[in-house]
Amino acid sequence: MGKLIGISTGLKNVDMAPGNIPCVVINSDFVKACNKYGNTAVIFGPQENLEMIDVSKFDAIVISGGGDINPNIYGEEKLEKTIRISDNRDSTELAMFKSAEEHNVKTLAICRGHQLLNVYKGGTLHQDLKDSGFSQIDHDKPFDDARSHVHDVNIESNSKLYNIIQENEIQVNSIHHQAINKIGNDLQITAKSSDGVIEGVAVTNGWNAIGVQWHPENMLEDNVSIKLFEWLNS
């Protein structure tokens, strides 16, 4: 029997019988990325009873991408460009992080998940990169470009991310307008883009957890994605 990989996601209103209803939705490429290694993807949507959240039965989890994080969590007021907030999803995924850290469950945090990992560890976010002065690279590409290389990322040699990917410079896709600002506790910055945006982090207190700002699930044949999902599924 293979491993169980828990994958978080949010809700999306979908037209289906008996009408337009909120559904748990996930990119099916996540399922492919687990099945490829003989493992099973288990979809973990927003929960109502947060005290019951326990990810210890999973061999690994993914905290996936999505809308913006409520800035109240990291002590800031919501700005105009902060959109698509889901308090229920925020609370669920923060509880997943807490359980994963307590039980040392391997964790891959992607895009929004990468940002939320930083918030979970006491860090803050840039609510909009352009408003924060990052204009050298267009990080907020349309979804049509999700399967294309957009910009370079430089990886720190002395980092968990380098140990996984074994490259100092890679090309990634980019679909985000927010990013890590103040780094959280017990986190190492493992990668940055040429304009200084934090593209990778790793937890340093023994919990086997990393975050990446790009979307490896959208480029499963890419060498970087292959190495990340090999690590996740191992």
Image: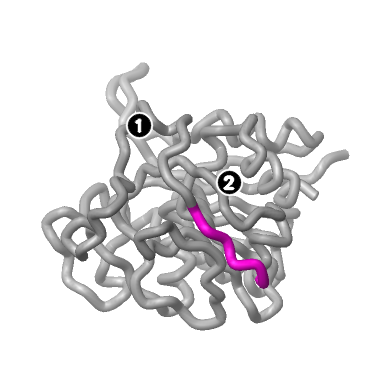
**Residue 34 visible in the current orientation:** yes
Nearest to the observer: residue 140 or residue 2: 140
* 163 relative to 46 in the view: left or right: right
Question: How many numbered marks appear?
Answer: 2
Label 2 sits on a secondary structure element that is strand
Nearest to the observer: residue 46 or residue 30: 30
Q: Residue at x 62, y 41 (%)?
A: 225
**Residue at image mark 1:** 143
Q: Is residue 124 above or below residue 136?
A: below
Q: Quadrant of residue 156?
A: bottom right
Distance between the alpha carbons at the discs numbered 1 and 2 = 21 Å
The scheme the figure's colours follow is: one colour
Q: Is residue 33 above or below residue 124?
A: above
Residues drawn in magenta: 153-158
Three-letter code, disc 1 = Phe
Q: Is residue 9 above or below residue 220?
A: below
Number of the label disc, if any, that sits on residue 7: 2
Q: Residue at x 47, y 59 (%)?
A: 199
- Where in the figure is residue 40, as x and y percent of width and height? 73, 37
**Residue 49 visible in the current orientation:** no
